[in-house]
Image: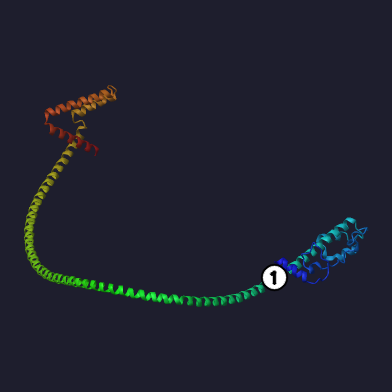
């Protein structure tokens, strides 16, 4: 759409000058007809390369170039300021730089012009499309209005024809409906009479049932009243009986409590007497024990004195043990023989003690004496 409209506008636009080639046929005319300004700083020799002359550049041309050159070109030209002539290689390089700058500038101008023309064409296209849309909307509204009117006219015609065709059908339908309604009314009247007779019978049965239920309800009410009265009387009698029973039980309970208190008092008195007797026995036993301990301490002191006076050898057993120990120290007997001698001495002593004294008394006394002696010696 854009390309066709732009070509159409370009074909209608008058020519402003310039030559349009086949390669740039798509560009606008004012872009194609724009003349490229000539560079006054470039000599005629360089603008006409087909002339068979020597390519040279002078110091004047370099100064006329001015700021159009790049920084590298300026440095290169500063080095060659004092030279009046330059070689052909230097001229070729300057020409190539100048051509490149001019090509870049031309390309930039072409791009700017193309961008401006494109924006202008887009604005024109947008404006044209908006105008066409408005025009199409107006046409659609008008066509819609006309079609709606035609449709309404058709509907009215159809309704008229339908009413005309249906009028006779309605008359026939009304007549048939009257006949059917009369027949239906007769059937309904017959059914109503039948239902009325059934309803009368149902009401008679219901009233009879209702009267029976009322009689049963009254009977139940009388029964409930009598039961309530009997319950009240029974509760009163029961309350009186419970009170009497409670009094009797309380009296029995008080008697039992008295009997239990008397029995407890008797038991307490018995336990008190027993406690007194046990206390007496305890004091007596305690006094006996204290007396016995005092006697035993006196016996211990006597035994200690006896031990101190007899130099520990107060029995045959100790004398024999002392003699055997001296033999053991002098190496006259060995350890095993010493143990055998000790066993033999103990057996002899046990036999002699059992023959001379009663068994229980002698053993208990010997053990007590030996323990006491050991305690005294330790102290």
The quarter of the rendered structure image containing the N terminus is bottom right
Q: Residue furthest right?
A: 53
Mark 1 highlights which residue?
125
Relative to 180, say whether 254 is above or below: above
Residue 359 horizontal side relative to residue 38, left or right: left
- Image point (18%, 39%), residue name: 300
Residue 180 horizontal side relative to residue 205, left or right: right
Relative to 301, say whether 167 is above or below: below
Q: Secondary structure at mark 1?
A: helix
The percent position of residue 378, horizontal first and vertical second, equals 24, 38
- Image point (28%, 73%), residue name: 190
In this view, the residue in front, 131 or 349, is 131
- Image point (33%, 74%), residue name: 183
Residue 176 horizontal side relative to residue 294, left or right: right
Q: Quadrant of residue 200?
A: bottom left
Q: Quadrant of residue 350?
A: top left
In this view, the residue in front, 97 or 113, is 113
The percent position of residue 31, horizontal first and vertical second, equals 79, 68
Instruction: State how many labels appear.
Output: 1
The percent position of residue 34, horizontal first and vertical second, equals 81, 68
Specify few, some or many for label 1: CA neighbours under 10 Å numbering under 14, 14-19, or 20 or more.
some
- Image point (72%, 66%), residue name: 4
The quarter of the rendered structure image containing the C terminus is top left
């Amino acid at each position: 759409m854009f390309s066709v409209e732009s070509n159409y506008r370009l074909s209608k636009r008058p020519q402003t000058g310039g030559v349009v080639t086949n390669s740039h046929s798509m560009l606008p005319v004012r872009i194609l007809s724009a003349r490229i300004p000539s560079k006054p700083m470039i000599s005629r020799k360089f603008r006409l390369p087909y002339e068979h002359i020597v390519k040279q550049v002078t110091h004047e041309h370099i100064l006329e170039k001015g700021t159009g050159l790049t920084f590298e070109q300026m440095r290169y030209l500063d080095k060659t300021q004092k030279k009046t002539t330059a070689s052909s290689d230097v001229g070729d390089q300057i020409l190539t730089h100048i051509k490149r700058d001019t090509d870049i500038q031309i390309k930039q101008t072409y791009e700017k012009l193309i961008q401006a023309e494109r924006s202008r064409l887009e604005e024109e296209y947008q404006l044209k499309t908006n105008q066409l849309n408005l025009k199409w909307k107006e046409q659609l509204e008008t066509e819609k209005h006309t079609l709606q009117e035609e449709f309404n006219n058709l509907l009215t015609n159809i309704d008229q024809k339908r009413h005309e065709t249906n009028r006779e059908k309605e008359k026939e339908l009304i007549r048939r409906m009257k006949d059917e309604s009369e027949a239906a009314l007769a059937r309904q009247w017959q059914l109503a009479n039948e239902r009325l007779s059934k309803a009368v019978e149902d009401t008679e049965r219901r009233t009879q049932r209702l009267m029976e239920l009322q009689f049963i309800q009254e009977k139940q009410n009388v029964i409930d009243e009598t039961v309530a009265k009997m319950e009240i009387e029974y509760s009163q009698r029961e309350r009186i009986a419970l009170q009497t029973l409670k009094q009797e039980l309380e009296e029995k309970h008080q008697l039992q409590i008295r009997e239990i208190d008397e029995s407890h008092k008797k038991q307490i008195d018995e336990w008190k007497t027993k406690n007194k007797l046990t206390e007496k026995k305890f004091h007596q036993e305690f006094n006996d024990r204290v007396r016995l301990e005092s006697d035993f301490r006196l016996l211990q002191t006597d035994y200690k004195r006896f031990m101190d006076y007899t130099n520990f050898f107060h029995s045959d057993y100790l004398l024999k043990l002392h003699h055997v120990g001296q033999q053991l120290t002098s190496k006259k007997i060995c350890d095993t023989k010493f143990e055998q001698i000790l066993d033999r001495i103990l057996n002899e002593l046990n036999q002699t003690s059992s023959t001379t004294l009663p068994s229980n008394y002698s053993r208990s006394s010997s053990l007590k004496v030996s323990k006491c002696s050991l305690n005294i010696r330790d102290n």
